[in-house]
Image (cartoon, rainbow, N blue to C red):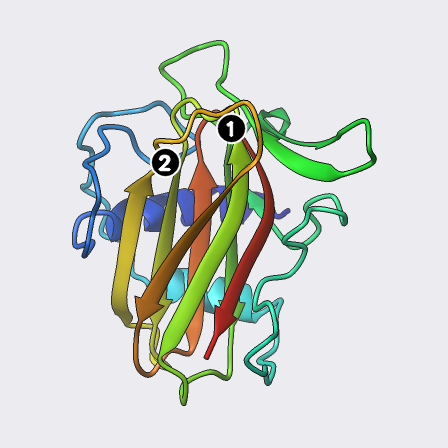
Amino acid sequence: MKKANLLVLPTVLLSLMVPLLNVTQADTTVFASEKIKDHDFESKKTVSMIISTDNNKESSTNYSQSDNLLKDGDFTQKLTNWEVLNEDINLAEVATEANGNRYIHLKQPADPTYAPGIISQTISTNTSDLNHYTLTFDIKSNVNGAYMIHFFDADGNRITGQMKILDSNSSEWEKQEEVFSVNGVSSIMLSFKGDMKLDNVDLTAY
């Protein structure tokens, strides 16, 4: 991962957290790799920065209803298509269960004034003619996990988004599901942060 992305992406994530729609619960921490500052939303960075950054890596792809828009949602490729937004990349570790299943373990740092593990993926899609999106994923051993998703139009403008605190704390895998109705989507950014185990992240359009 290029060092520049570590500086740009967390700042952009901060700027997107203020105008969120359908926020399930307010979060007093921030999606950032630097020290946590409660309610620190002063960034002026533009959304277009994250879109242009990821479009240099990913080309638009045509998808059908059954396709997972994300890459490596089961983490078998060891975060090849995800970005770790922490200075300490060990806060996002791909682990393997006894049965061979791989998953991502996002961790809390030893210094609690720093953000926990954060991963993010931005995709450029060809789903502007579709208007429903289903996000599913499995979690367990969740302490303070959350996800943030944003939908952008072809000009890089944010259409809508949501940040949600995950309240599951089961020691067994539990499936979470959210459905979003959004028109004119060209790019999607999905991020997870917290102290939790995560697997089988799937985002489909129909």
Q: Which residue is mark 1?
A: 196
The number of numbered badges drawn on the structure is 2
Q: Position of residue 111 (x, y in %)?
A: 44, 10
Q: Amino acid at mark 2?
A: Leu
Q: Does residue 198 sit above or below 191 in this rendering?
A: above
Give how far across and how far down residue 32 sits, in percent.
Answer: 39, 35
Say whether marks 1 and 2 touch (CB < 8 Å).
yes
> At 43% across and 25% down in the image, what residue appears?
169
Distance (Cα) linking label 1 and label 2 = 10 Å
The residue that mark 2 highlights is 166
Looking at this view, is 11 or 27 the one in front? 27
Please, what secondary structure does the residue beneath circle 2 have? loop
Q: Quadrant of residue 194?
A: top left
Name the residue located 46 percent from the left edge and 79 percent from the top edge.
206
Of all residues, the one furthest to the top in this rendering is: 110
Q: Nearer the viewer, residue 103 or 9?
A: 103
- Write the residue at 58% across / 83% down: 64
